[in-house]
Image: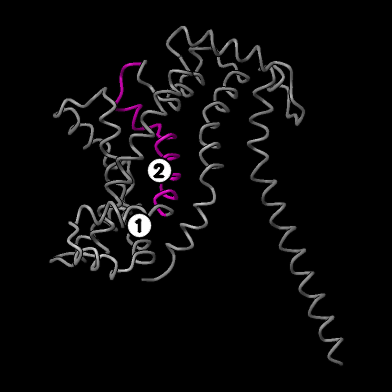
């Protein structure tokens, strides 16, 4: 076999591999997109049409479904109020959780203190415990401190975002040089100032990555508000959609799909805006210290 033939074979093999990879990725992307596409399509169809069968063609009931949704808003099932409630709860929970997680991660990454490894092991162990197991205990705690039926009952637990602590600790070790911190100390800067002027800006990509996951998790939280909130005007959008999908309101699937589509729109916007941080943040966060 000549050198030219070997080069041709390598090029042919490379092209075949690329074609296979792109084919698999395209098929996977289509499979992932189909449920979302059908959701938006069904939001434009009547309930009877949806029950009749599957369709990939948009219907003509979008405005009618929207009017029904507005009419429901005059009662106890106010989707738009639920969207505002979800936006407030998810935003404040995300900001609080990531600020506390950044502080904790920075401390674990650059401070040496007695029991540091044991404390971090406890945090990692908490990652393995399902949130549902602690819900009864937290309900009793919230009852003692009179937090039930308040947004604080949902926002305060977000301050203990252990996965973000784990991720940001790894990320901080990858992007922040300890020499920079030492130099700032020599210049006379305090520890709090060093964290806010050096630590937080360099952790920006990692925080943005965790912000997406935290926001989506808080936005989609259904069980917590269902247990801790009692006033219908405080319900977030997942609970409102749960109410729509009951016989009490004579389930209209067109309206239900439209409500779900509206609830997902903010998440899609957040993802589109911050998507570049996901790859950048995860790539750098995966590096060893």
Residue 215 lies in what quarter of the image? top left
Disc 1 to disc 2: CB gap under 8 Å:
no
- Part of the protein shown in magenta: 206-232
Toward the front, the furthest residue is 187
Q: Say which of 203 and 262 sits in front.
A: 203
Q: Nearer the viewer, residue 162 or 226?
A: 162
Q: Quadrant of residue 195?
A: bottom left
* Residue situated in front as seen by the camera: 43 or 168: 168
Residue 25 at x, y percent in the picture: 69, 56
For the residue carrying disc 2, how many other residues have a C-alpha within 10 Å: few (<14), some (14-19), or many (20+)?
Answer: many
**Quadrant showing the N terminus:** bottom right
Helix, strand or loop: magenta stretch: helix
Nearer to us: label 1 or label 2: 1
Label 2, secondary structure: give it.
helix
Label annotation for residue 214: 2
Relative to residue 194, is residue 23 drawn left or right?
right
**Which residue is labeled 1 in the image?**
168
Would residue 127 be counted in the magenta stretch?
no
The quadrant of the rendering that contains the C terminus is bottom left
Q: Vertically, is 67 above or below 24? A: above
Label whose residue precedes the other's in the sequence (1 or 2): 1
Q: Residue at x 82, y 86 (%)?
A: 6
């Amino acid at each position: 076999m000549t050198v030219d033939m070997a080069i041709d074979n390598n090029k042919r093999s490379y092209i075949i591999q690329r074609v296979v990879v792109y084919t698999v990725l395209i098929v996977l992307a289509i499979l992932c997109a189909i449920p979302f596409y059908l959701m938006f399509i069904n939001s434009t169809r009547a309930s009877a049409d949806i029950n009749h069968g599957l369709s990939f063609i948009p219907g003509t009931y979008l405005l009618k479904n929207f009017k029904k949704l507005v009419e429901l808003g005059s009662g106890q099932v106010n989707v738009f109020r639920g969207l505002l409630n979800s936006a407030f709860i998810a935003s404040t929970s995300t900001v609080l959780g990531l600020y506390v997680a950044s502080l904790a991660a920075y401390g674990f990454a650059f401070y040496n203190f007695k029991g540091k490894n044991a404390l971090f092991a406890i945090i990692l162990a908490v990652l393995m415990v399902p949130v549902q197991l602690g819900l009864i205990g937290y309900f009793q705690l919230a009852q003692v401190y009179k937090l039930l039926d308040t947004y604080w009952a949902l926002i305060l637990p977000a301050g203990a975002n252990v996965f973000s602590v784990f991720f940001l600790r790894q990320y901080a070790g990858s992007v922040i040089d300890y020499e920079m911190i030492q130099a700032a100390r020599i210049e006379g800067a305090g520890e709090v100032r060093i964290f806010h002027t050096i630590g937080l800006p360099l952790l920006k990509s990692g925080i943005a990555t965790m912000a997406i996951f935290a926001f989506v998790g808080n936005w989609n939280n259904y069980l917590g508000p269902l247990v801790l909130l009692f006033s219908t005007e405080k319900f977030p959008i997942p609970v409102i959609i749960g109410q729509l999908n009951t016989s009490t309101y004579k389930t209209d699937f067109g309206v239900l799909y439209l409500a779900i589509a509206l609830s997902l729109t903010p998440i899609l916007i957040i993802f589109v805006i911050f998507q570049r941080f996901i790859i950048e943040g995860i790539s750098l966060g995966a590096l060893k210290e």
